[in-house]
Image (cartoon, rainbow, N blue to C red):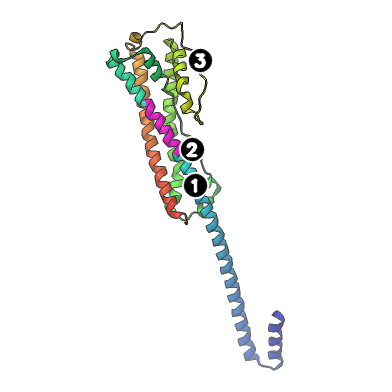
Amino acid sequence: MIKFFRKIRQNLLLENKTGKYLKYAIGEIILVVIGILIALQINDWNDQRKDNVKEQEILKRLRKEFTANRVQLLEKTKNKKDINKKCSRLLTFYNEPEKAELDSIFAYLGSVIPTTFDPIQNDLVRSGNIEIIKSEELKGLLIHWSTDVVQLREVEQMFLRYWELQFSNYLNEIGIARDFGHSFWQKAGSTLLETTEIRNPIPGKSKISKVSKEELLSDPKLEGVITWSLNLNTFTNQESQTLLKRIDYILEVLASEIKK
């Protein structure tokens, strides 16, 4: 093709047709420019197609991750609600001790175990791949997601630290740690990653402890420990509910961006 155009130019020059040669040369330049522009456009289309494919892959992966996060958060929220229910029941015993049994007190205390949310975290922001996502709303939600998780973890840590420093230590002080542990393992199977029947590692309740129901239900310090556990865990669960709404909205936006 290049030889063909060169031959035409040479013939025009030999025939001394300078005007026609200039017109032809300009036309040839225009054709070359058009060809370059077409090639660039085709290249842009290919790049855009690749980005679209990659974006859809990312969106589908995000949907899978946030669906898994939602399932985990619902389970942790359910556990927190159970803790609150048991704490409330324990406080009711302080008002109506005649309705309480020592075994029930130990069983409810054994249910007060902190649970924490550990979501799947994507690295879109750090890697720069978030720019492939076209939806500005979705990008904003993903950028703020890590901050939302940190906020929940902070309040979860408040309850966890209180449980470690106050709750569990006090159980040791009053001499019912073994009874607490035995009661905990009675239902621990339902809180594991994989629900299963497990053997209680603590062989029965304490034969040494002489703490009575009356002593426990007249102890203001234990009542305070239970109250603070209920307060902190309620606060944690409120944050969990807020984060659950965030997940639901992110999944809604993802659904609108994923092509059928």
Estimate the x, y position of residue 252 in percent, counting from the top left.
41, 49
Instruction: Judge by depth and name the residue closer to the eye, 242 or 14.
Output: 242
Q: Amino acid at mark 1?
A: Leu
Mark positioned earlier in the residue sequence (3 or 2): 2
Q: Is residue 192 magenta?
A: no
Element type at marker 2? loop
Q: Is residue 207 left or right of residue 88?
A: right
Is 160 left, or right, of 10 in this rendering? left
Residue at the spot of label 1: 62
Instruction: Mark 1 or mark 2: name the one nearer the start of the chain.
Output: 1
Q: Earlier in the sequence, mark 3 or mark 1?
A: 1
- Label 1 residue SS: helix
- Write the start and end of the magenta stretch as one range: 71-83
Amino acid, disc 3: Ile
Residue 81 rendering spot, x and y as whole percentages: 37, 29
Most extreme residue toward the front, as rendered?
A: 197
Q: Which residue is mark 2?
A: 119
Identify the image quadrant of the N terminus: bottom right
* Residue 78 part of the magenta segment: yes
Q: Is residue 21 above or below residue 171?
A: below
Nearer the observer, 64 or 50: 64
Q: Which residue is mark 3?
A: 202
- Residue 121 percent across, percent down from the top left: 51, 41
Q: Nearest the camera: 225 or 186?
A: 186
Which quadrant would residue 228 be assigned to in this image?
Answer: top left
Instruction: Name the residue located 50 percent from the left edge and 18 percent from the top edge.
Output: 200
